Structures are given as C-alpha cells and as structure tokens.
Amino acid sequence: MQNIIQNHYIIAVFIARIFLGFLFFLQGYDTIIRVGIKNVIEKHDVSFSEGGIPRVLTSIGVWLTSLIQLLGGLFLIVGFVKYYVLYLLGIEMILAAIAFGIIKPLWDMRFIFPRFTVLIFLLVVPSEWDILSVDYFWSFLKFLNSF
C-alpha cells in the first residue's frame, strides 16, 4: 500500500491518458461509424458555408479530425507515440476552435475545455511518470537490447 501511495502520480497519469484517449476515440468512432462522415459534413456545411468556409474544407476537416480523434484516442489508450498524438490532438482542437469560432464567436466550450486541460496536463508531466504504456515498454526493450 505504501508503494502505491508513493507512486500515485503514475496512476494519475495513467488515468488521465486513458480518460483523454477514450474521449477522443469515442468521438472519432461516433463520427465515423455511428453517425457517419457524410451526415456530419451535411450537418456542419450550412453553418460553415455561412461563415465563409468552403464545403471542400469542411469535408477535409471532418475527415481529418475524425481520423485523428479515432486513431489518436486509440494510441493514447495504449500509450503509443504519446507526444506525437498529443501534438496532433492539440492542433486538431485549435483548428476546431478556429472553425467554430468563425461560425459562432461565443460557442460553447464545455466539451473542449476538459480535453484541453487533460491534454496540457499530459504534456507537462514528466514522461517518467507514464510507465504503464506501450512507449515505456518499448523503451525498456530497447534498453535491454543494448546489453
């Protein structure tokens, strides 16, 4: 029990990474599988067109962000190439903020702000705290191979 208490930061990073991964994975899954890309494009096309965003950009944006969310979420869940995924998801959130800011300057941030907060947390904590991941296991195998 004492070891768990002393290493609670490892569990905190693990929970945060899994939580954020599931949020993004499920959003990407919902867009691609449940609702369908075409339906999402149709839903947003009118408001984006009124904001001056062409349909082709809306289509590319929906496809790109959905794939980043789905794969990025999956990669976060298992802890694979974490920093690259966090950078991509951060860029995706900035692009979403710009796009939705164009169509409605005071848009509701209740869905993006928690993700943003957890993403920043994962970027600033030391990587040594994230030992329950594929990345850590991979680096451990590399270390063993060096002998």
Image: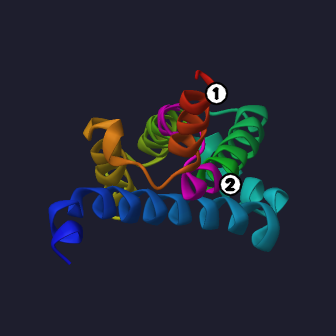
**How far separated are the C-alphas under marks 1 and 2?**
33 Å
Report the amino acid beneath label 2: Leu
Residue depicted at 59% across the width and 21% down the height: 146
- SS class, disc 2: helix
**Relative to 131, is 136 on the left or the right?**
right
Looking at the image, is mark 1 or mark 2 nearer the viewer? 1
Which class describes the residues within 10 Å of circle 2: few (<14), some (14-19), or many (20+)? many
Element type at marker 1?
A: helix
Q: Nearer the viewer, residue 44 or 8?
A: 8
Taking the image as shown, residue 79 lies to the left or right of residue 41, namely left
Give the residue at mark 1.
145
Q: Position of residue 40 (x, y in %)?
A: 73, 59
Magenta span of residues:
74-87
- Assess whether mark 2 and mark 1 are in contact (beta carbons under 8 angstroms): no
Q: Is residue 85 magenta?
A: yes
Q: Is residue 51 visible?
A: no
Q: Is residue 41 left or right of residue 51?
A: right
Residue located beneath label 2 in the image: 70
Taking the image as drawn, is residue 60 in sight?
A: yes
Q: Nearer the viewer, residue 40 or 25?
A: 25
Q: Quadrant of residue 13?
A: bottom left
Image vertical order of residue 108 relative to residue 133, above or below: below
Name the spot of residue 127 as percent of width and height, x first. Answer: 35, 37
Residue extending furthest toward the front:
147
Residue at image coords 60%, 29%: 142
